[in-house]
Image: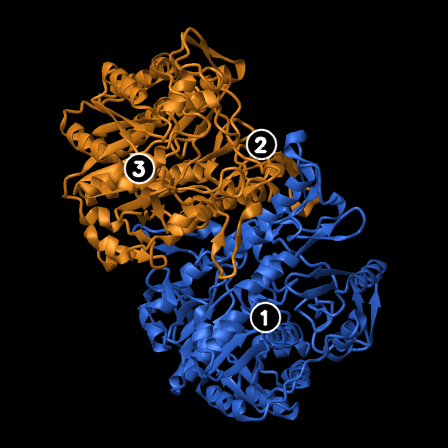
Chain colours: A orange, B blue
Amino acid sequence: MRVVPSDLEIAQAHKMIPIRDIAASIGLDEDDIDYYGRYKAKIKLEVLEKFKDRPNGKYIDVTAITPTPLGEGKTVTTIGLTQALGKIGKKVICTLRQPSMGPVFGIKGGAAGGGYSQVVPMEDLNIHFTGDIHAVGQAHNLLAAMIDASILHKNPLNIDPLTIMWPRVVDVNDRALRNIVIGLGGRENGYPREAGFDITVASEVMAILALTTSLKDMRRRLGRIVIGYSYDGKPVTAEDLKAAGAMTVIMKEAIKPNLIQTLEGQPCILHAGPFANIAHGQCSILADMMALKLADYVVTESGFGADLGMEKFMNIKCRYSGLKPDCVVITCTIRALKMHGGVGNVVAGKPLPEEILRENVPAVERGCENLAHMIKIARYFGVPVLVSINRFVSDTDAEVEAVRQKALAAGAEGAYPITVWADGGAGAVDLARAVVEACEKPSNFQFLYPDHLTIKEKIEILATKVYNAAGVRYEPLAERKIAQFEAQGWGKLPICMAKTHLSISHDPKLLNVPRDYIFPIRDIRASVGAGFLYPLAGAMRTMPGLPSQPAAFKVDIDENGRTVGLF
Amino acid sequence: MRVVPSDLEIAQAHKMIPIRDIAASIGLDEDDIDYYGRYKAKIKLEVLEKFKDRPNGKYIDVTAITPTPLGEGKTVTTIGLTQALGKIGKKVICTLRQPSMGPVFGIKGGAAGGGYSQVVPMEDLNIHFTGDIHAVGQAHNLLAAMIDASILHKNPLNIDPLTIMWPRVVDVNDRALRNIVIGLGGRENGYPREAGFDITVASEVMAILALTTSLKDMRRRLGRIVIGYSYDGKPVTAEDLKAAGAMTVIMKEAIKPNLIQTLEGQPCILHAGPFANIAHGQCSILADMMALKLADYVVTESGFGADLGMEKFMNIKCRYSGLKPDCVVITCTIRALKMHGGVGNVVAGKPLPEEILRENVPAVERGCENLAHMIKIARYFGVPVLVSINRFVSDTDAEVEAVRQKALAAGAEGAYPITVWADGGAGAVDLARAVVEACEKPSNFQFLYPDHLTIKEKIEILATKVYNAAGVRYEPLAERKIAQFEAQGWGKLPICMAKTHLSISHDPKLLNVPRDYIFPIRDIRASVGAGFLYPLAGAMRTMPGLPSQPAAFKVDIDENGRTVGLF
């Protein structure tokens, strides 16, 4: 058995192509880009105007079944499929979201794919990259400071400090900042109140960056951010605080999508990274719009499972972009299907249980109910579906064949084992050919709900059709806020459900396809600037913590100044 | 009278030279730099090795008299002198510190020189530039989170939470974060305690960036940061917390100096920006080391007056760099000399008082005592001194001549009026010629005190020789901590006095040359990683606030997406 080196070793040993040449390969010249070092560049928004008459390429979304806590290898699949499309001679770009720096030094370590399916320079993109997340944090925190300064300076907007829902942000896993009291120390430090910090990617500014379509549109969305209410119940916006112009200037570079490359030299546009727990968790609309003008095939990724990431991709991102996907790829692992089939329990940071490594076709078949449900969700949207099986050494042919049969029976166009982690693009050539074929099939893309439905109607469609619930229960807080939001005229915004990704339901312990249960809505919040409402089905963390042995302990430079221990 | 447009208008209208060509003009090729867009680049540290056998250029420090709250135009002079040296055919680079973003949106607005003596692209360098300040903030805040996480996870280092002196930082003027309580909300959020935020540039990590000489040296200095004490009184370091390696990796790009240009096309290396209130307030040693290998003349700037900025430049920065200045230029304005001479009071944000605009030679002559004292301080260090008079339209020839006579009498090599704000380099050609001549004079550079003196001996030398005090008074807290620091072995570190810049003394109301007073030391703190002790003579703010009408109100994009209102 071949030994695959660590992600960092592979990435550091790889000889990258100068980004100038990557840009040239998709028709971008020196005036279209800004270099950030030799291997990163920002693409100017004028490129959209320059190529506006070109037809769009094919648009492929990679999603997954309900993952185990280790993940199904969705990013690896996205990058591997991109490399495979390159291998069969297609002009292809993948679009990815930017990872957050905080978790790199926490439990997770950094990543942008893995093995021989990575995008590079991976150190950079896990650390500061081109500074976009920092810009989001600056814009966010300037608004926060302007709120408290406005209250201190005679509160001309009559803001009720107890209604403020705009936290501060930092891109560090810092649990001590979750709940704090600010403004202590006397009059000149302002009005003491309870407050808190989120991780930067949870900022609504990040969601705006991901959903905006132009600089002017971003300016308008930033202005629409609602930070709280006045004493007479009126929403107070960033525009009211005269902060939105400065926030836009702070975000002027960040709005430009970033160009990097895969290990096999395909272009990758990596841009924006909204927190998947309370936002939609996907790369920017601008990244996709641009990629579709610059390539014949664009492979993107939607976070978590198809019930969560793909649903938001379709109902929120495609609603704002006007783009239509041509094909969906649902990734799965045999081990996850076994777990859904009732065998073994995968826990992050612990070795896999022995029984999950043994052949067990019946367990895999039972677990395929989850896969079949995900295929059904994708088909609600009228888009052809393929299944990719992220194959491990311990998976048997019989298990793989069982998945293929179940996938076809559920309506997938095909199902293909891939080995892109170990083999790069060569490990997904069959899948790539099938994707090309599927993209030629008629796609009858449609949303799951129209804008004009009420908030409750939309939630109920999601709960029953997507989460397979028998009905919805609203807690009193949610009831009250839904009524308030409808009265504000926010009812027509799409829904961005905040729920666990470890189950189709709200309860991470309910594996496979839960049924006959009631989906509970505890609370609902509004990201009016980004343009969605997010009901909360459970407690959603917006600030991770550091464990007792954080990844940071191992990170250092070696004698030659090279980074070690990052992954 | 000619009307000079706003700084932003001049900068935006200016046609910049591609940074590639600027780099080539000083012998740097594609492998020596990393582009950040078309007009900014980072210079790799390998350049120091590549050119190590070249002799250093001449090293010129621009400083000032005790400034009015409007400043004496030190940065304008530094850039204007650089442009003037270019104009007379010299190969010259200026080195500057990076401005902090927080104040750009507060009272101050951004700046990097002004009028026709600016460095560009000025919007960028006032906003994110190449991300160095963000990197400092990330490294700083990771350490902060690791402190609280360590205490939560059974406190293996036995840290006494009440001794922690490592705040968190943010690059926003946010007074509400000065005094806060963190860790609320129960066990999983950690140990509740009082804490606070400083502005990012006040971080010791920034001071380290400014004083380091290599990547390995930075790694060591980061490790030496003392964040507090254990219950048994032992200093706890970033090394003890296993944070210094990760902090170094976060700072790996930030350590590379940044290359930009003046409005007249001379190279400018702009790098690091330690807070002048509690650190030494100057651009990095690496910027200067590099510039001295790449040009025949290097013009740099030391913050505030010669009693504060230049003294630290000599006693701290040159001590760590081993570099020796060849010439000092002391800038002054006629209006400031009048104020020191007892006429008029300059207040930021208010029109100049009428009496300060009227000719008053006797007042100017009285105020020249301040200038003479600054010349004396520079001469302690054995370096030739020139005086530049930053001339305004209302200054009369008689006033300028009075300054020249007083400067010569005090031991300056010469004194020259300059008009670089309105005229660019052409406005300082005489000064430039005098600088070239002064640099050929013998310089007998020496420190004001040797390392081995005690903390009190060093403070007393500064107080009596530099601040013109009759003696020093230590408050009990300072007495106790000085004894503690001596016992820790930190006594040999140089002193970085934290005092007002508006007076030679500790009291901003004492203008001109205060005498017969006692200099009070309230407290003393240690930046062991950066490598200095900072006694506090008065209350030093480390987090500015936003005023009722912050500069942010006016900043926006116009119809064409251009920034407006930034200055």
Identify whether B428 is placed above or below A530.
Answer: below
Locate residue A259 relative to residue B85 in the image: left or right: left
**Which is nearer the eye, A2 or B397?**
A2
Q: Chain of mark 3?
A: A
Residues flagged by tags 1 and 2 on a common chain: no
Callout 1: few (<14), some (14-19), or many (20+) C-alpha neighbours within 10 Å? many
Q: On the image, which quarter does residue B277 sit in?
A: bottom right
Locate residue A78 relative to residue A251 in the image: left or right: left
Which label lies toward us, 1 or 3? 3
Q: Is residue A213 visible?
A: no
Q: Is residue A96 visible?
A: yes
Residue furthest front in the image: A1
Q: Chain of mark 2?
A: A
> Between marks 2 and 3, how big is the CA–CA gap?
54 Å
Residue A208: x and y, percent? 39, 38
Residue A486: x and y, percent? 41, 20
**Disc 3 residue type?**
Val
**Disc 1 residue type?**
Gly
**Disc 2 residue type?**
Asp
Identify whether A68 is placed above or below A156.
Answer: above
Which label lies toward us, 1 or 2? 1
Residue shown at 51%/20% (left/top)? A538
**Which is nearer the eye, A228 or A285?**
A285
Instruction: State the residue position of label 3.
Output: A420
